[in-house]
Image: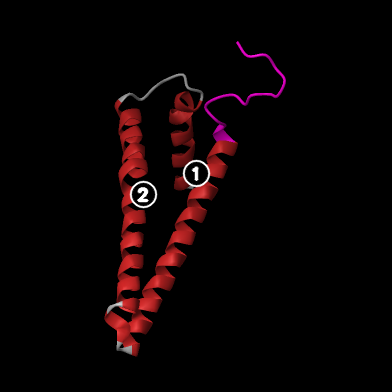
Amino acid sequence: MKIISHVGIFSILSLPLIVSAQSFGPIDAFFTNINTFINTTLIPLVFGVALLFFIYGMFRYFIQGGASEDDRNKGKQLIIWSIIGFVLMVSIWGIVNAISSGLFGTSRPPTLPGTPTI
C-alpha cells in the first residue's frame, strides 16, 4: 500500500513536468549532459572496444595461432563473440531509434512530393 501512495505522490508532483508547465532547470541540464555523454562518448567507446577485440581475435587467429591450433580456436572464438557483440549493439541501437522516432517524432517535418517549398 505504501508503494501505491508513493507512486501517487510522485505522479502528482511530476504533473507540471509532464504537461511542460514547469522546467526543472539544473535537473534538465543534468540529464541532458548524461544523454550527451552517453551518445558522444560511451557508445563510441563500446564500439571501439568491440573493434579492438575483433582485431585482437584476428591477430590470434592468423599471426599468433599460425602454429598452434589452440590459439587459432581462441582467436576464432574472439572473432565470433565480437561479431555477435556488433550485431547486438547495432540491433539495439536501431530498435531504440525506431521507438524514439515513433514516440517523439522527428525534429523536422517530412517533405511531401509535389508541394511547393518556401
Q: Amino acid at mark 1?
A: Ile
Sequence-wise, which precedes: disc 2 or disc 1?
1
Q: Residues within 10 Å of mark 2 (few under 14, many from 20)?
A: some
Q: Up-down: is 42 above or below 30?
A: below
Q: Amino acid at mark 2?
A: Ile
Q: Which residues are magenta?
A: 103-118
- Say if the magenta span includes residue 89: no
What secondary structure predominates along the stretch shown in magenta?
Answer: loop
Viewer-closest of 83 and 88: 83
Q: Secondary structure at mark 1?
A: helix
Which of the 4 image quarters holds residue 72? bottom left
Residue 31, given in percent of the width and then of the height, sits at 34, 35
Which residue lies at the image location 47% right of the left edge and 22% below the top edge?
Answer: 20
User: Who's the residue at 46% across and 19% down the image?
Assistant: 21
What residue did someone put label 2 on? Answer: 43
Residue 4: mark in rendering: 1
Is 60 placed above or below 38 here?
Answer: below
Q: Residues within 10 Å of mark 1 (few under 14, many from 20)?
A: few
In the displayed structure, 107 sits above or below 49; it is: above
Horizontal relation, residue 60 to residue 115: left or right: left
Q: Secondary structure at mark 2?
A: helix
Judging depth in this view, the residue of 4 and 98 nearest the camera is 98
